[in-house]
Image (cartoon, rainbow, N blue to C red):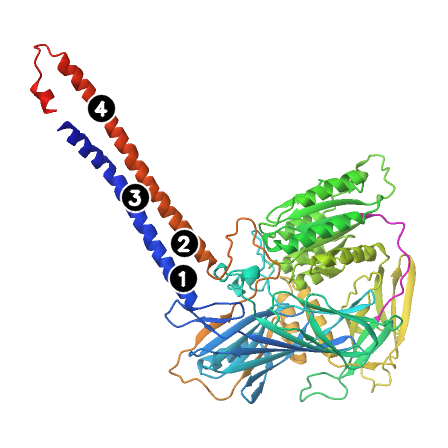
Amino acid sequence: MRTGLCLDHYLNLQAPLRRGLNFAISGIVIMMASWINVAQAMSAVEITQGSFVYHRQGESEPQVAMPLNTDVQMKVSGWVNRVTVTQTFINDSDDWLNGSYLFPLPNEAAVDHMRLIVGQKVIEGQVREKEEAKKQFELAKATGQRASLVEQSRPNIFTTSVANLGPGETLVVQISYQELVKYEKGEFSLRFPMLVNPRYVPKQGGGKNNSYPSTQRMLAQLVDPSYGFGEFRAAGPKVNIEIDLDAGIALSEITSVYHDIDKQPVTNTQYLLKLAGDTPANRDFVLRWTPVSGSEPVAAIYAQQGQTHKDANSSPEDSDYALLMLIPPEVGAISAIARDLILVIDTSGSMSGEAIAQAKKAMGYALAGLGTRDSFNIIEFNSNVHALSAQSLPATAKNIGRANQFIRTLKADGGTEMGFALTRALAPGMHSAYQQNEDNSDPDSTRLKQVLFMTDGAVANERDLFSLIEEHIGHSRLFTIGIGSAPNSHFMERAAELGRGSFTYIGKLDEVQQKIESLLYKIEHPQITDIELRYGDGTIPDHWPISIADLYANEPLLVAIKMRPKIYQASASELIVSGMIGNQYWHSSLSLNERKSAAGLDLVWARKQIAALEMSKNGANQARVKKQVTALALKYHLVSQYTSLVAVESIPAKPSSVVSNNASVVQSTPFGWQPPVGYLPQTGGESRLLIMMGMILLGLGLAYLASFSLDKGAGLSMLRSLAAQKRRQTVSIKTGGDGHVSAKGLET
């Protein structure tokens, strides 16, 4: 009887534990069943990059229409590139759709034209103030009219929205813009961005002067873990690029740096180029072309009469527009000035993968280029800022070895607190160790501080950082180095301009040595400072940029000018450019009577003026700058922060009883990107699901084994207790006082 009582007591004690264990196992089983349902849903809908993804009203399961197609046509004429981007929205579903697509354009792109094509019908877009254009588009959406809207989300990021795309229909939006090509060290180049990276918003103070929306909000589907990433993620959206390259001079070489192209010569100065095969939009496209030796440009004036977009009030007396191109003479290297080179590297999570490898390799080459009279320091930043040393170090072999060891330990993870890093790098208190000697024995104590800032620029608070650079730059120079497949060119170029430096783009490891050596060569050579423009009679032309940045070796001077038309007798006939090379005065004159014809120069001039106005905006002049930018954009038919392009079909297409679903395009994963340490790996479309199911099954197995361990342990404990009790009872029987066995003992 006692044994039965003990066992019942034990079972009563274990009952709560068993009930909890059973509850846990049941919960895990239910969880696994729900994940299996998700797997079935995901297998039914394959979501790839570039897909048109939407949800039906009242349903949570994603629906997918056909991918977005993008075709790019470029017409390069000398220094000017006219680009048309055609976005084809295909609705391969049974639902009516409203769609949106976020995409980047070059930093200096002057977007001036848009057309909506529905079947054989072509609707020309019109520039309106942003609020007015938005209202017109939303009204068309509500009344069933097909419509499109192109807005500037950030200075180099735009959004195309389309309304009322019917089942089985195709809607085409064409966007055109104007830009100038680049020229450096005898080589022309252009860059077409294909990808918008998500940008980090600083924890403190970020965005206080920033009137643009966060890219995290604009890019909710950019790198959704459910869709996979990197090489395992489905390719897209697809981009096709065709280029009519008319250089105007004989060419010796044409190179597509990151993509394969087909080349077809037309003449020795003109070529037809095309991307080979299907190209995913996961890294920027860069094209370079080199003139035959001896035919390099030296100086030229390109001009255009009147405006590109004329209105009813246009007259022959409207202004002319010109582009001044001048390459100053190259002189020998500076020997009197030593450098304090501050190397700043971004080690945030967005730099993970190939980007951090490029940056570390670039820093190694920069250290190798230091001279014995130079000093240096290294600053790395992510969510925090760390420096190799509290002060700059002499460029000795020992210190450079220490720096290389510091670089090898760097890993990409965390946020992008760029403001703290810029403040640290530009701080006047970060002196060279040479300058700490009380006897001031350093012969090169007047070192010129040059900051090499290596980053992908994935930040959302550009305006705050621009203000910080203006406040702290002093006599230093800031050179930005764009790293990765799609760096933020708006931030990189503007930061270098404010820092009186230059911007260098490195897109793959093979380029690092050549790009860094070229940059170091450039900054070691004398810059042309205090550049000014004037007419022969001493008057100042209306030119942009109004403050011309310093020039380095082999850099061209490019200035957009608004001039009085040639019909006036008093119009200027000569333009004089002057500046300082070292301590020597330099000047050059160009005749305005020998102008070369070019188109779209008014758009370039207006875009540069708008950029300068936006850079000058602060809390005190914000309302005035908004009025100035709006007036300029409306006059020259440009998309800006305050103006948009809108096109609306006149007749409603969608029945009023039908509800349209809102769709958006799934973005690409940046080429070469790898997840930071601790990121849950995904090796396919359903890999995340499979990993979770594996973890659940493992948990079930462990719980099952644990239940056996509990039973086994409890059983052994009970047997030991019964054996001990039996021994005690046996002893009691043997030592009974009357020599008889008790009834109690016999019962037991």
* Numbered tag placed on residue 723 in the rendering: 4
Q: State which tag comes first along the sequence, 2 or 4.
A: 2
Q: Residues within 10 Å of mark 1 (few under 14, many from 20)?
A: some
Q: How far across and down, in percent of the image, does residue 116 sit?
A: 57, 83
Indicate which label's residue lies in the foreground, 2 or 3: 2
Q: State the residue position of label 1.
A: 39
Q: State which tag comes first along the sequence, 2 or 3.
A: 3
| Residue 614 seen in the figure | yes
Q: Residues within 10 Å of mark 2 (few under 14, many from 20)?
A: some
Position of residue 459 in the picture relative to residue 736 (left or right): right
**What is the C-alpha distance between the residues marked 2 and 3?**
20 Å
Amino acid at dot 3: Leu
For residue 585, which quarter of the picture?
A: bottom right
The answer to whether mark 2 and mark 1 are in CB contact below 8 A is yes
The relative height of residue 411 versus residue 720 in the rendered view (above or below) is below
User: Does the magenta run of residues contain 338?
Assistant: yes
Position of residue 386 in the picture relative to residue 537 (left or right): left
Considering the numbered disc 4 on the image, is that residue within a helix, a strand or a loop?
A: helix
Q: How far across and down, in percent of the image, does residue 61 sit?
A: 40, 67
Range covered by the magenta-colored residues: 326-340
Considering the numbered disc 3 on the image, is that residue within a helix, a strand or a loop?
A: helix
Q: State which tag comes first along the sequence, 2 or 1.
A: 1
Q: State the residue position of label 2.
A: 693
Q: State the residue position of label 3.
A: 21
Considering the numbered disc 1 on the image, is that residue within a helix, a strand or a loop?
A: helix
**What is the C-alpha distance between the residues marked 4 and 1?**
54 Å
Q: Residue furthest right?
A: 584
Indicate which label's residue lies in the foreground, 2 or 4: 4
Indicate which label's residue lies in the foreground, 3 or 4: 4
Q: Residues within 10 Å of mark 4 (few under 14, many from 20)?
A: few
Amino acid at dot 4: Ala
Residue at the image point whose x is 31% and y is 48% from the top? 25
